[in-house]
């Protein structure tokens, strides 16, 4: 589904990604962990196509297609979703209207008919139920006055509604209490299927108690330096990152 080879990216002459390799197959959940400043958010932005980063080397293929020349919108139409893609506050634009527009833009680009109002409402109610959110949420102004927890739930709600093939969740757990964490994780787990894939970027192991990853990577200094299964996340929680730095230095 996603194949990244030797990816190098910089921002204003600062090298941030330094030859990163990653392969994600349909049905898989990958966790990417790593210290602050390692390049995790840069990686998600580069996959989604944000324009402030220069890719200087390497390739990103999604469903066999080179996406490096595509705009963020075109990548979203292909089925790539990044949490925080829509963090802007839009007073006067409700959550439901925003989603309706986003969904129908994607459908239009794919040559499909817009989703009917009844179908849309039914789907929104169903997904809100999974996330234990009240339907009054739909008429709120997008992101305006949202609490931290509401923002996170809204990200997962957007993901559930847009049904991407690849969802990248960058620190969706930060600032969540345990109840909200469980609800967010439940939303992700309901979304998981053999046809889609999820990349969860997180500092903390605790989210991975609820979203069990198939593969865990450690991203450090712009590269994936170690890959393992879920036990790697537990090991990181217990021992920190220093032992990996030493391992990498010894190579
Ligand atoms: P992480 O998400 O792993 O904490 P980031 O990808 O946010 O790491 O940042 C990686 C490095 O790139 C950091 O050193 C950060 O300071 C730098 N960086 C990220 N975004 C910018 C930017 N817009 N301008 C300058 N430097 C940036
Ligand atoms: Mg950071
Ligand atoms: Mg980050």
Image (spheres, rainbow, N blue to C red):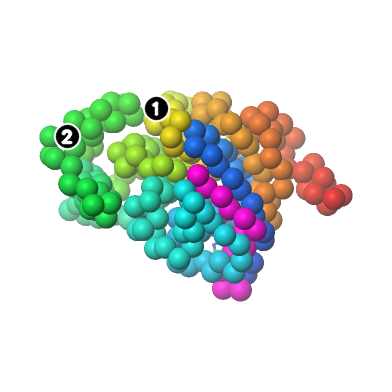
Q: Main secondary structure of the magenta part?
A: strand
- Drawn side of residue 136 relative to residue 188, left or right: left
Seen in the picture, residue 160 relative to 179 is either above or below; the reply is below
Which is more N-terminal, label 1 or label 2? 2
Give me the disc on residue 156. Answer: none
Q: CA distance from mark 2 to mark 1?
A: 19 Å
Q: Which mark is residue 119?
A: 2
| Residue 190 circle label | 1
Residue 59: x %, y % from top left: 57, 60
Q: Residue at x 65, y 58 (%)?
A: 6
How many residues crowd mark 1 within 10 Å: few (<14), some (14–19), many (20+)?
few
Whether residue 131 sits left or right of residue 247 in the image: it is: left
Instruction: State the image quarter where residue 233 is shown.
Output: top right
Task: Please report the residue visible at 14 percent of the width from the left and 40 percent of the height from the top.
Answer: 116
From the viewer's perspective, tell me whether residue 36 is left or right of residue 74: right
The residue range painted magenta reads 1-13
Residue 151, compared with residue 126, is above or below; it is below
Give whichever of 137, 17 is nearer the camera: 17
The answer to whether the residue bearing label 1 lies less than 8 angstroms from the nearest atom of ligand 3 is no
| Total number of numbered discs in the rendering | 2
- Name the residue at the bottom extreme: 13
């Amino acid at each position: 589904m996603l194949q990244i080879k030797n990816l190098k990216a910089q921002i204003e002459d600062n090298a941030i990604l330094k030859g990163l390799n990653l392969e994600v197959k349909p049905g898989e959940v990958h966790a990417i962990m790593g210290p602050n400043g390692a390049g995790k958010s840069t990686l998600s932005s580069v996959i989604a196509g944000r324009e402030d980063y220069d890719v200087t080397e390497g390739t990103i293929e999604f469903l066999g297609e080179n996406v490096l020349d595509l705009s963020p919108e075109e990548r979203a139409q292909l089925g790539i979703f990044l949490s925080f893609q829509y963090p802007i506050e839009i007073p006067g634009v409700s959550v439901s209207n925003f989603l309706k527009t986003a969904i129908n833009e994607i459908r239009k680009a794919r040559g499909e008919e817009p989703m009917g109002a009844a179908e849309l409402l039914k789907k929104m109610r169903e997904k809100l139920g999974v996330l234990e959110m009240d339907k009054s949420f739909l008429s709120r102004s997008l992101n305006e006055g949202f609490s931290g927890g509401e923002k996170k739930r809204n990200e997962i709600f957007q993901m559930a509604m847009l049904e991407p093939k690849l969802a990248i969740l960058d620190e969706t757990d930060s600032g969540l209490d345990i109840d909200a964490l469980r609800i967010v994780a439940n939303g992700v787990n309901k979304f998981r299927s053999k046809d889609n894939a999820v990349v969860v970027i997180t500092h903390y192991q605790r989210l991975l108690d609820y979203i069990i990853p198939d593969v865990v990577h450690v991203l450090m200094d712009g590269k994936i330096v170690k890959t393992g299964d879920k036990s790697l996340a537990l090991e990181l929680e217990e021992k920190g990152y220093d032992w990996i730095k030493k391992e990498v230095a010894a190579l």
